[in-house]
């Protein structure tokens, strides 16, 4: 599995790209970063340069393929041609996730491991702790998308060129323990250097990093709602310090130049593709609720060839009605797809929705209602909107049902499609009708097929683990926490 032992030319190019983005994003900070280090030997790069590279890379990869593919499954997007159309028709073959998989492992996780190793050796605990929390976050996304993945033997370079696959049920406890280690390191805060302006996410605010770590623990425990129903409630009962305000939201903010642009903006606008039509599923649901977020979630139809200019319209999931002229369908709007829009890793609104779900499952209707309303308030506030009239609608006012909590969360989680896909698989909400044209027999994908790179380079470990099956069958398999 070369991708774990050698930095290829592609890896070097990706490293240089993310480093270029980092330098541009941090230019206003006037912080000197050592860019003379060989990008083919990142272990020689100081942690103050590795951290922003890892953070920006994570945001870019997650906001790109990590959002476009699951966002099509949960019907945020309904691309009309090219890759986005294939995603909407559930035709995601192994090679289509090669870049996402390899970048998450060989860029983000590799850089984070270098930070941990260097920081542990030097006694710089805050850097180690931040990297441990981000490592847990990154591995959690990968295992939630694929199921069993290389974990305990991954990232060993020449020490293991064919890492075994760990079972997801074994990975989850290890991730929770890693978060605890990260929090402990941050709170100990020993050493001579600490994150500052090189920290793209929190600018070195360690209190916020502890809150992010705890909030991530709550998220992961809640993912286990089908298999360990009491896990999230038990953790919440410890009264952890959680993300509670929009100023504490964990996100990677992008810049205003092509080199530093938001990944969706780069993919669909700067490239000239214009393939990423939005889905009529979310558009029509938000219209039915007179949702004030519509103008910032979606851009109106651009051209008037079909007489639809200025309207907000979505494509039918899996529909191939060509809209290269942008005459028919809307595209993603300014909130999360303008040139400098953020990629949100975890928001204050999401935390409140998780609390609402946990309290609902525990039978605490009043607490669930409080958290549900707080979630809506926080999301609207983050977008500069008022939620009062929206919450007053009978269809929005809290009715003490899981369906309502999850449907409102689904609208908010437009900010993080990979997490909305987790929620849909766990709860079945919102109720989605499979794309009429699809390759999986009408089954919305429950996981991603393993990348072609793994089939080619780590086949023995893959076969000994989850196995190698036709990719359309793999898309229908369930991950550990997604029991029928």
Image: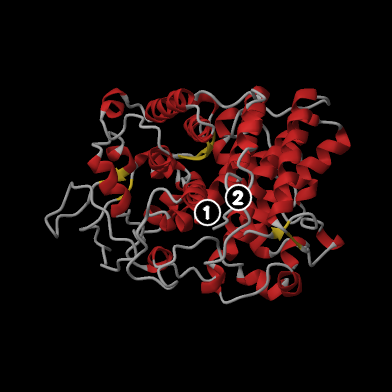
Query: Residue drawn at (64%, 22%), measured in percent from left and top?
Result: 239
Q: Is residue 346 above or below residue 272?
A: above
Q: Depth check: give the residue in front, 247 or 401.
A: 401
Which residue is painted at 21% across and 58% down in the image?
Answer: 328
Circle nearer the viewer, 1 or 2: 2
Disc 1: CA contacts within 10 A as few (<14), some (14-19) or many (>=20) = many
The residue closer to the viewer here, 148 or 339, is 148
- The answer to which quarter of the image holds residue 91 is bottom left
Viewport quadrant of the C terminus: bottom right
339 relative to 220 in the view: left or right: left
Q: Are marks 1 and 2 in contact (CB under 8 Å)?
A: yes
x, y percentage for residue 135? 70, 44
Horizontal and vertical percent position of residue 362: 54, 32
- Residue 91's place in the image compared with 146, above or below, is below
Q: Residue at x 50, y 53 (%)?
A: 425
Quadrant of the drawing holding the N terminus: bottom right
State the residue position of label 1: 66
Crowding near the residue tagged with mark 2, few <14, some 14–19, many ≥20 C-alpha atoms within 10 Å: some
């Amino acid at each position: 599995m070369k991708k774990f032992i050698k930095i290829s030319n592609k890896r070097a190019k990706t490293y240089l790209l993310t480093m270029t983005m980092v330098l541009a994003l941090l230019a206003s900070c006037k912080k000197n970063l050592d860019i003379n280090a060989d990008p083919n030997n990142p272990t020689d790069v100081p942690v103050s340069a590795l951290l922003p590279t890892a953070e920006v890379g994570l945001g870019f990869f997650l906001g790109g393929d990590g959002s476009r593919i699951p966002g099509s499954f949960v019907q945020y997007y309904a691309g009309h041609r090219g890759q986005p159309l294939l995603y909407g028709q559930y035709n995601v073959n192994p090679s289509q996730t090669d870049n996402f998989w390899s970048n998450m492992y060989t860029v983000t996780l590799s850089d984070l491991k270098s930070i941990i190793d260097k920081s542990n050796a030097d006694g710089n605990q805050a850097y180690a702790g931040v990297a441990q929390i981000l490592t847990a976050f990154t591995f959690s996304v990968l295992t939630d998308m694929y199921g069993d993945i290389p974990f305990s033997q991954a990232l060993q370079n020449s020490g293991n060129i064919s890492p075994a696959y760990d079972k997801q049920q074994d990975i989850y406890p290890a991730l929770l323990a890693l978060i605890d280690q990260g929090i402990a390191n941050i709170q100990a805060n020993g050493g001579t250097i600490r994150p500052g302006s090189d920290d793209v996410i929190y600018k070195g605010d360690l209190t916020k990093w502890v809150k992010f770590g705890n909030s991530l623990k709550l998220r992961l425990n809640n993912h286990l709602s089908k298999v360990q129903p009491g896990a999230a409630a038990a953790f919440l009962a410890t009264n952890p310090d959680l993300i509670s305000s929009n100023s504490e939201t964990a996100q990677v903010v992008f810049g205003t130049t092509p080199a530093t642009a938001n990944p969706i903006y780069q993919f669909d606008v700067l490239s000239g593709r214009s393939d990423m039509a939005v889905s009529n599923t979310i558009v029509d649901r938000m219209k039915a609720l007179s949702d004030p977020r519509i103008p910032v979630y979606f851009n109106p139809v651009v051209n008037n060839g079909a007489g639809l200019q200025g309207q907000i319209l979505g494509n039918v999931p899996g529909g191939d009605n060509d809209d290269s002229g942008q005459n028919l369908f809307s595209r993603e709007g300014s909130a999360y797809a303008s040139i400098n829009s953020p990629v949100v890793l975890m928001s204050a609104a999401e935390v409140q929705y998780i609390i609402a779900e946990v309290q609902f499952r525990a039978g605490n209707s009043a607490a669930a209602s409080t958290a549900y309303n707080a979630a809506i308030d926080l999301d609207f506030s983050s977008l500069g909107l008022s939620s009062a009239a929206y919450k007053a609608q009978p269809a929005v006012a809290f009715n003490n049902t899981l369906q309502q909590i999850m449907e409102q969360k689904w609208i908010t989680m437009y900010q993080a499609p990979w997490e909305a896909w987790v929620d849909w698989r766990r709860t079945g909400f919102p109720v989605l009708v499979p794309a009429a044209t699809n390759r999986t027999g009408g089954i919305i994908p429950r996981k991603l097929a393993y990348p072609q790179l793994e089939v080619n380079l780590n086949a023995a470990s893959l076969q000994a683990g989850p196995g190698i099956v036709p990719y359309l069958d793999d898309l229908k398999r369930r991950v550990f926490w997604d029991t029928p």
